Amino acid sequence: MLGKSSPVTEEEALKKLAALCARTEYCTGDLDEKMRRWGLDEEARMRNIDYLVNHQYVDNMRYCQAFVNDKIKYNKWGRRKIEQALWAKHISEDIAKTVLDHIDSSIYMDILKPLLKAKWPTIHAKNDYERSMKLIQFAMGRGFETELIRRCIEQNMIAGTDES
């Protein structure tokens, strides 16, 4: 019987989730989705989530801080893309906004500048304007704000790349 397993009881689910949460950070949305796939009803899911939150196995604020930090540092994502990912994980808007507002702008810009600088030579276009627009599209796809992208291009990128 591949893919079919016996339904998980509420207690078994709680033990599995506690073990998972002890190893790595999860948000309540991820845990709820796991329990839904295991076939638990909504009341059992809520009881398990309440237990895990009350016993500090799971904390959406802690998860959000780790998620944002990792996505900026390792995936080189911007605020908008991170915001969308947090929304998809059912993180409350208040928590997401609080964490996103505390992103260190110097670290944020230190991620964006090299990203743009590395992409600039790989873009093929008829002129610098078209090239800049393609660079803006690329950075917006990564979730960075248009205003920051333009500022980077005007201050550093075009002047900096013409010299090399």
Image (cartoon, helix red, strand yellow):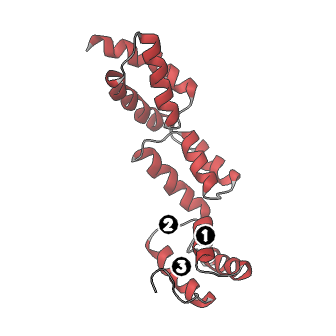
Taking depth in this image into account, of 73 and 126 the one nearest to the observer is 126
Tell me if mark 2 has few (under 14), some (14-19) or many (20+) residues whose alpha carbon lies within 10 angstroms of its own: some
- Tell me: 160 left or right of 146: left
Taking depth in this image into account, of 15 and 127 the one nearest to the observer is 127
The answer to the question of whether label 1 and label 2 lie on touching residues, with beta carbons closer than 8 A, is no
Residue at 56% over, 26% down? 146
Residue at 58% over, 87% down? 8
Give me the disc on residue 25: 2
Residue at 61% over, 90% down? 9
Q: 4 above or below 74?
A: below
The residue wearing badge 3 is: 17
- Amino acid type at circle 2 is Glu
- Amino acid type at circle 3 is Leu
The residue wearing badge 1 is: 33
Numbered disc 1: secondary structure: helix
- Amino acid type at circle 1 is Glu
